[in-house]
């Protein structure tokens, strides 16, 4: 990741893995040697109004507290419990799969993308997208719910740990809200609720966001008095069309001022 960021001429890199800081911890000395500004981050799956919503936490001036790290270890335990239940669910559907096969792909932070890779390798599906569509997405036949912390708890934990909580990829949240929308303002209402819980920022820049989406979320952030964050949501081979720092087919260019403004907070 550090080498790729330097090769892409990025000034800064934020590592925001789900529920772990292990990647940041390993990258920090490498980034320091390379002269790369490395930002400690996290992505947490939360529950809000009965739906899964992702929350980002950015620790822009110092690493998170020991208490925050201890809380993440508890989330890690719940992740493995879900993986074991997912194995049982898939086996009940006739899929011959073991936890050892999946953990060989994901090691200590095994998740659904690693299940998808095993499903492709064993011939149950032909692509990673198909693995999610048929078995792993929330609406798929193999899906198993994991423990997701309430949004309020996630925000409070990030704040107490010294971080800035930001709503991740709001366009995905908006799509879910608007399926049952009556007047098109439901997303605004959700963001206002989160702000009242302590949300400090909105991910305006993202690989899924078109120029008109960026404008919409910039305006929403201004109206809600929220800071702006951004990221490519790079997932390596799991999302091969997303480039680190450049997004989907080069649609992303996050200005340095975004990070500077976060640090000024």
Image: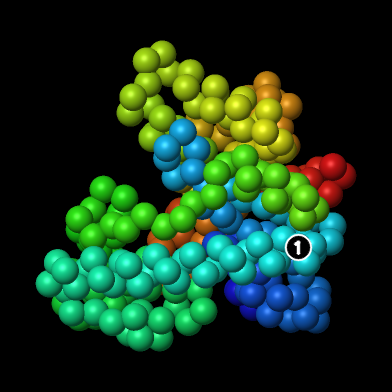
Quadrant for residue 132, please give it: bottom left
Helix, strand or loop at mark 1: helix
Q: In the rendered view, does 160 fall on the left or right side of 4?
A: right
Badge 1: few (under 14), some or many (20 or more) residues near its Cα, within 10 Å? few
Q: Residue furthest top?
A: 183
Quadrant for residue 26, please give it: bottom right
Quadrant for residue 240, please give it: bottom left
The picture places residue 55, in percent across and down from the top left corner, at 58, 47
In this orientation, which residue lies closer to the viewer: 230 or 251?
A: 230
Q: Confirm whether residue 190 shows in the render.
A: yes
Q: Confirm whether residue 8 shows in the render.
A: no
Residue beneath the point at 33% across and 84% down: 101
Residue beneath the point at 41% across and 30% down: 177
Residue beneath the point at 34% across and 80% down: 99
Residue beneath the point at 28% across and 72% down: 87
In this orientation, which residue lies closer to the viewer: 75 or 263?
A: 75
Q: In the rendered view, does 253 fall on the left or right side of 62?
A: left
Give the position of the N terminus as an image quadrant.
bottom right
The picture places residue 7, in percent across and down from the top left corner, at 64, 73
The residue that label 1 is drawn on is: 67
The picture places residue 111, in percent across and down from the top left corner, at 42, 68
Q: Is residue 115 above or below residue 161?
A: below
Q: In the rendered view, does 225 fall on the left or right side of 208?
A: right
Give the position of the C terminus as an image quadrant.
top right
Q: Is residue 180 above or below residue 238?
A: above
The picture places residue 211, in percent across and down from the top left corner, at 52, 35
Q: Is residue 235 above or below residue 225?
A: below
């Amino acid at each position: 990741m550090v080498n790729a960021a330097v090769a892409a001429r990025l000034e800064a890199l934020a590592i925001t893995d789900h529920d772990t800081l292990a990647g940041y911890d390993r990258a920090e000395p490498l980034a320091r040697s390379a002269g790369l500004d490395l930002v400690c981050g996290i992505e947490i799956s939360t529950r809000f109004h009965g739906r899964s919503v992702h929350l980002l936490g950015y620790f822009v001036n110092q690493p998170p507290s020991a208490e925050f790290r201890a809380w993440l270890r508890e989330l890690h335990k719940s992740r493995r419990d879900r993986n074991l239940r997912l194995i049982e669910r898939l086996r009940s559907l006739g899929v011959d799969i073991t936890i050892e096969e999946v953990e060989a792909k994901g090691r200590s932070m095994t998740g659904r993308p690693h299940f998808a890779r095993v499903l492709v390798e064993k011939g149950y599906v032909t692509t990673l997208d198909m693995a999610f569509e048929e078995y792993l997405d929330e609406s798929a036949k193999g899906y198993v719910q994991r423990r997701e912390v309430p949004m309020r708890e996630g925000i409070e934990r990030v704040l107490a740990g010294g971080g800035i909580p930001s709503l991740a990829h709001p366009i995905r949240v908006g799509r879910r809200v608007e399926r049952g929308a009556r007047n098109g303002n439901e997303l605004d209402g959700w963001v206002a609720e989160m702000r009242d819980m302590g949300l400090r920022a909105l991910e305006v820049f993202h690989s899924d966001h078109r120029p008109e989406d960026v404008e919409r979320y910039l305006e929403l952030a201004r109206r809600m008095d929220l800071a702006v964050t951004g990221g490519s949501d790079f997932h390596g081979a799991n999302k091969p069309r997303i480039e680190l720092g450049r997004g989907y087919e080069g649609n992303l260019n996050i200005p340095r001022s975004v990070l500077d403004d976060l640090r000024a907070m």
